[in-house]
Image (cartoon, coloured by chain):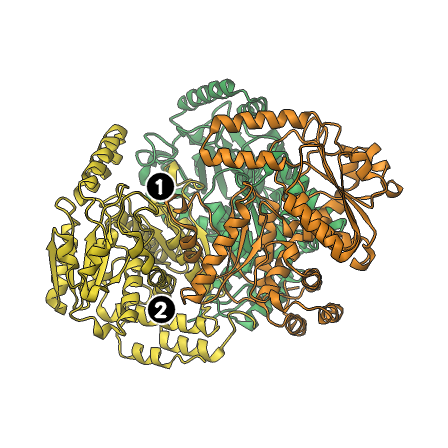
Chain colours: A orange, B green, C yellow
Amino acid sequence: MSNIKPFIDKLNGLTFDQMYQNDFFLTWEKTRDELDAVFTVADALRHLRENNISSKIFDSGLGISLFRDNSTRTRFSFASACNLLGLEVQDLDEGKSQISHGETVRETANMVSFMADVIGIRDDMYIGKGNAYMHEFMDAVTEGHKDGVLEQRPTLVNLQCDIDHPTQCMADMAHIIHHFGGVENLKGKKIAMTWAYSPSYGKPLSVPQGVVGLMTRMGMDVVLAHPEGYEIMSEVEEVARQNVKANGGSFTKTNSMAEAFQDADIVYPKSWAPFSAMEKRTKLYGEGDDAGIKALEKELLAQNAQHKDWECTEEMMAKTKDGKALYLHCLPADITGVSCKEGEVAASVFDRYRVPLYKEASYKPYIIAAMIFLSKIKNPQEVLQALEQKGALRKTL
Amino acid sequence: MSNIKPFIDKLNGLTFDQMYQNDFFLTWEKTRDELDAVFTVADALRHLRENNISSKIFDSGLGISLFRDNSTRTRFSFASACNLLGLEVQDLDEGKSQISHGETVRETANMVSFMADVIGIRDDMYIGKGNAYMHEFMDAVTEGHKDGVLEQRPTLVNLQCDIDHPTQCMADMAHIIHHFGGVENLKGKKIAMTWAYSPSYGKPLSVPQGVVGLMTRMGMDVVLAHPEGYEIMSEVEEVARQNVKANGGSFTKTNSMAEAFQDADIVYPKSWAPFSAMEKRTKLYGEGDDAGIKALEKELLAQNAQHKDWECTEEMMAKTKDGKALYLHCLPADITGVSCKEGEVAASVFDRYRVPLYKEASYKPYIIAAMIFLSKIKNPQEVLQALEQKGALRKTL
Amino acid sequence: MSNIKPFIDKLNGLTFDQMYQNDFFLTWEKTRDELDAVFTVADALRHLRENNISSKIFDSGLGISLFRDNSTRTRFSFASACNLLGLEVQDLDEGKSQISHGETVRETANMVSFMADVIGIRDDMYIGKGNAYMHEFMDAVTEGHKDGVLEQRPTLVNLQCDIDHPTQCMADMAHIIHHFGGVENLKGKKIAMTWAYSPSYGKPLSVPQGVVGLMTRMGMDVVLAHPEGYEIMSEVEEVARQNVKANGGSFTKTNSMAEAFQDADIVYPKSWAPFSAMEKRTKLYGEGDDAGIKALEKELLAQNAQHKDWECTEEMMAKTKDGKALYLHCLPADITGVSCKEGEVAASVFDRYRVPLYKEASYKPYIIAAMIFLSKIKNPQEVLQALEQKGALRKTL
């Protein structure tokens, strides 16, 4: 039996009117109330769906997806979210389009947006480029809307950029909130965001950056751990420090995985590439220097290989709070002896946490849907109420 | 003028409650009543559509398609079926996804299924693998649903595996039933499922296997004909023999196309690869033995070329019942002098049967829709009745 | 506040009943009334959408797209139009399908059309082929419908062929009509459809051909300008001459860009390949003569390079009526110093006209939707009225 009231009550205590007709780039550009509104609407939409009540707020309209990197789970999460709300996904596949033929971002942004309500972009490969590309794209549609070219201005959901991966980290956080029984219980909880060894090369920094940028909002004790040379963007570290000033908790760094895991309530061991290497790679790509890229790859793999001891083993897990820290990963993980010879996590640890890991992932479609909902609906409480009252079946019984 | 009653009356005489929330892997895993329910619901959905009445049972939801082999007609049939019922197709394209990057089936299955109501998989290339893959996939979502990861458990429609091609063979059968004026008229009818020459290599065995596995359910006289060396899976032949025991009719084998065509009511001449060769190929692919694969291909083409006389010519057709057997093919056919120099069927035969062949294919979207409908709707009779009563227009007049 | 009445009044004065259940191949195969009906319905649908009123006329159904050349804007326009009316786009991607494996057009056309309401095809690469392919495709579905294979006959929207680009030129015309305050104000207006230099090779002729074929319907003075050797299809020039006879205005040709621009109200400077070269190329492709194709490409680029002075510069623009002609382009344009070193248009000219250019493009989704609407709805006035009265929200407020 559906009961949307608790979600509405929660929303009534929050201020988030600036989200209406606005984009979602980085979590730290949003207020705590706005983030809480996303978590609450995500839960409300899930509640409606679990009670077989339609959440369609669009009769027609497009959700444009632009993936400049491979994706399974984010692609399906975006498609699920759009479908839940009544939008049809249209993929802007640069292979099929004329983008490569000298079309400018400004032009493309407008040309695909005549009937677009939301734009989801993943552009995480090149440091200094992805987030900037999204801004360029959205500035173009703002201008197009202002100039009367676009009837409506589509809003952005950042599906991963070079700086942040907000839909992932918000889903991670939704999982944490549910695990610990409420956001109010997170104060003083220790989370270890740690580097882990992977035999692959050049994984984006957006997850560790997004995690330290978001988790420091909740009064948690956030520890960032990595071998020397695997620094993340210093700007994001500064964001974390500012968050701590405003919200309490702490942000510390260490070059010891063991130290980070010690008494941790939550661990997030995951490989990433060094920021400086990614800067270098971006430059090499810009110059079309294939030989340089190959040499860099070789160098990075060798560098990685010096840190094979950065693995989330049973011994490591034993150091955590009661040996039972919540293990997080954005998936897919490099599992030792399963998906690779030596990887980020021991098979027995991964196996034990598989169900929670899948649940962690299950929040993403709802987080995305909530971001869209809040950017499109002026009075979310009224509309949630109306959806419940109407009670249109999601699926005929 | 719509009249759904005859379909409901027919369903009332059948037992098929086990289809609810269940998968469709192989026709011989279903009871006769269950198969008849599929044929009946397919006809009912077609009746509604032909009377411009909406069959939408989903307000939102995804139908996931996973094609591990090329497809036009099955892809469009699945898309049409999903659309008819209100689901949006989202294609799991392994090229665009991270599946190739060490992701396990279990994980992918869950990650794409958070809002999936149905999964359609085509995996027919490797003997011993396709059906097994589908089971692995569906076991994963069963577990995910049990563990609370998935709100709903999507159900499977097998869009062709290494063993059976149920949506094709059920569409073929729907065509036969309509041609002969009812399933009750099929007893004693002779159907020749025969090999035919093709200049191409390695066509799947799922159609001939599916045909002998399904047609022996109806009390028909099923003859399987092929040159020596083109045996199908022995397990499926055993299924056919068991079917005959239970349902009457007969199942015989011959190495003579002419013998199979003699007095046949229905002929289904079609190329396929020898089972043992497919086993060998699967092994070579597993070993990455490209040279071995090339050698095998050459050998198989040479073997095929010894049997160019296995062609559905006018002379062959003249041997059938009154020279007018119903000619079947899953399409596309290798037509002599049209799509190839020498092929499965003479151009004049194919031309004469083009319209019936296209009608045969036209049943597939409805068969798929019926499979989905029966796996998703607890009381199909009630819902069909309600759809007619509501009478929402499929298309504004 | 929505007011659909003026559109209905306009439609009441037009005769267009032959559009029902009919295809849209070439603009000059339609009467003036029929073209005006398209413009009017396009405006009406835009009016409804801008007033947040749903234009859904389909509860389910597919719009099939077949792009035999790259496309961004036309692809998204078709997707937007289908979505607006309630159809789901299913792309017939020849890479994913079995079309390349000897399947005939006739067969494919029927196999994808069981639940298709509209087919959008782009096939502009080969002279003498694209339009013929569309006819072959549509003849096949006509036959399939007549034979009882297809419940409904899908209708065609020509998304660009070798002869015409009707959705582009109709969008261009809608823009012109709005710019000059009504189709009745176009008599005597001078439009210069001129060739312009581009460093790329083999751009289709369908835009200049479509423009001279359509603009001569409106009593305008149409000047076609290009260097010697860049002739368009002579059949289309004949169409233009016949149009002038019937509708007044004029159709002239010149080899001087300056002459064409002199006192022009509208200019459309755009590169294209010579008709005879395209004929040659089509032949070489047919013969698989790669060396010949490369040689031709080299030759054409050299030929282009002799005409770098055919650029829409500020000097050129100054020659037009009050120096303020409406500048048109189908986009993307080759902009000097932006997308290429030397191109079709000076950056300052393009910049000044960016907003009108984007607005020009914004008509295309509505033009396509209107073409579908008129081919699917028997009484458009009634249905438009009913849509307004029902007033279903496009997007929940």
Against A299, is C238 above or below? below
User: In screen coordinates, is A343 left or right of C75?
Assistant: right
Which chain does tag 2 point to?
C
Provide residue C118's location: percent of width, then percent of height: 39, 58
In terms of image quadrants, where is residue C105?
top left
Residue A332, image x and y in percent? Answer: 66, 39
Q: Compare residues B42 and B86 and report the one nearer the observer.
A: B86
Q: Nearer the viewer, residue B226 or A239?
A: A239
Q: Does residue C324 appear in this view? A: yes
Residue at position x 86%, y 37% in the image? A319
Query: Which quadrant of the view contains residue C316?
Result: bottom left
Crowding at dot 1, Cα within 10 Å, few <14 / some 14-19 / many 20+, comes out as: many
The amino acid on which the numbered mark 1 sits, given as a three-letter code, is: Phe
Which quadrant of the rendered structure holds the C terminus of chain C? bottom right
Vertical position of residue B213 compared to residue B170: above or below: above
Q: Secondary structure at mark 1?
A: helix
The image shows residue A277 at horizontal and vertical percentages of 59, 33
Q: Which numbered disc covers residue C42?
A: 2
Q: Say which residue appears at 13% left-offset and 67% top-offset.
A: C249
Q: Are marks 2 and 1 in contact (CB under 8 Å)?
A: no
* Residue on which the image places disc 1: B350
Relative depth, front residue between B263 and B193: B193
On the picture, is C221 further left or further right than B160? left
Q: Let me know if marks 2 and 1 both belong to one chain.
A: no
C46 up-or-down from B304: above or below: below
| Secondary structure under the numbered disc 2 in the rendered image | helix
> Mark on residue C161?
none
Disc 2: CA contacts within 10 A as few (<14), some (14-19) or many (>=20): many
Depth order, front residue of B201/B356 = B201
Q: Amino acid at mark 2?
A: Ala
Quarter of the image with the N terminus of chain C in it: bottom left
